[in-house]
Image (cartoon, rainbow, N blue to C red):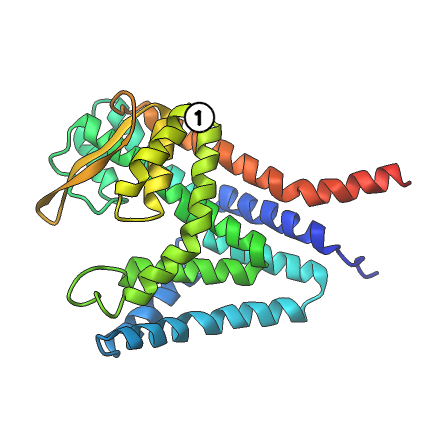
Amino acid sequence: MSLPELPALLALPLAALLGVGLDRVFGELNRWHPLVGFGRLAAAVERRMPRRRRAGVVAWAGVVLPWVGLAAGLRAALPSWPALGLDALLLYFALGGRSLAEHAEAIATPLAAGDLPQARQQLSRIVSRETGALSAEEVAKGAVESVLENGNDAVFAALFWFAVAGGPGVVLYRLANTLDAMWGYRTPRFLAFGWAAARIDDALNYLPARLTALSYALFGATANALRCWRRQAPAWDSPNAGPVMATGAGSLGLQLGGAAIYHGQIEQRPPLGAGRPATAADIPRALRLLRRSLGLWLGLLALPALHIWLTGVFHA
């Protein structure tokens, strides 16, 4: 007996719940993760291309769009229930919520126990700044900043593009975000070639970052969060990290940002948030903020399904 056709308004929230559930249960694959293979492909293409903007655009399109097209073609060819499974699987591969939480907890635990060297070492796995001489406050600050910023990149932006275009949308976002992480640097090697990857990722993250910031504001000190967003976000070089981190810091009532060492040079970053300095106990608070925001997003995605169910109840 074949399964009944699944209404489109039900398929998306069900696939989102399944994808998030898979990430929560299994986390990132340790072996054979598709993004690892994609990264190798992107690195091989980059090595063979000239250092020009046009080459960067061609390379971006050549390594991203075929996979988006493949996802769209498979999805269109499948019946509704297998298509739901494909969407859920693609979302699962794109999410990094459990991995982010595990990394953050690996910092918080030794930091709370007074093992500063171990906390520094764990922080070095998720940030690009130098961590060898950081104080306990600076380690906590770096961890909270990473949770807030990567909450958008690893969770909410993926969910946004999944809501817009299902599996193909989340493939587009995750591959573009991966290329920004690989190519989007202002160095002699990548300044021209990586321009397209950086700008495309900025464009794809523009709306998700602001929705993430709004979500953070709703689950904390809302007025303080919105004030920090308005006053501090424009000072950040990144048009998307600024709103996310300033609002998240303000929501938590923390003072983040400030000086950090990158590649041996002290970088004076603008302030983030308003309140007291971060401690080890604030890392779990940042994770709770992320999880509450995720619950809100999943609830909003489920509204069409709730509408269908209520309509059926009242017209039965």
50 above or below 110?
below
69 above or below 123?
below
Residue at 34% x, 23% y: name it. 253
Residue at 46% x, 47% y: name it. 208
Q: Position of residue 277 (x, y in %)?
A: 24, 23
**Left or right for 209, reference 272:** right
Q: Viewer-proximal residue, 294 or 234?
A: 234
Q: Which residue is mark 1?
A: 222
Residue 32 in sight in this render? no
Corner quadrant of residue 298: top right
Residue 73 in sight in this render? yes
Q: Viewer-proximal residue, 4 or 290?
A: 290
Q: Position of residue 271 (x, y in %)?
A: 24, 33
Q: Which amino acid, mark 1?
A: Thr
**Left or right for 300, reference 138:** right
**Left or right for 136, reference 220:** left
81 above or below 104?
below
**Secondary element at image label 1:** helix
Question: What is the quadrant of the N terminus in the image?
Answer: bottom right
**Left or right for 229, reference 51:** right
Q: Position of residue 10 (x, y in %)?
A: 71, 50
Question: What is the quadrant of the C terminus in the image?
Answer: top right
Q: How many marks?
A: 1
Tell me if mark 1 has few (under 14), some (14-19) or many (20+) residues whose alpha carbon lies within 10 angstroms of its own.
many
Residue at 16% x, 39% y: name it. 260
Please identify the residue farthest to the top as the structure is shown. 276
Q: Viewer-proximal residue, 15 or 166?
A: 166
Corner quadrant of residue 146: top left
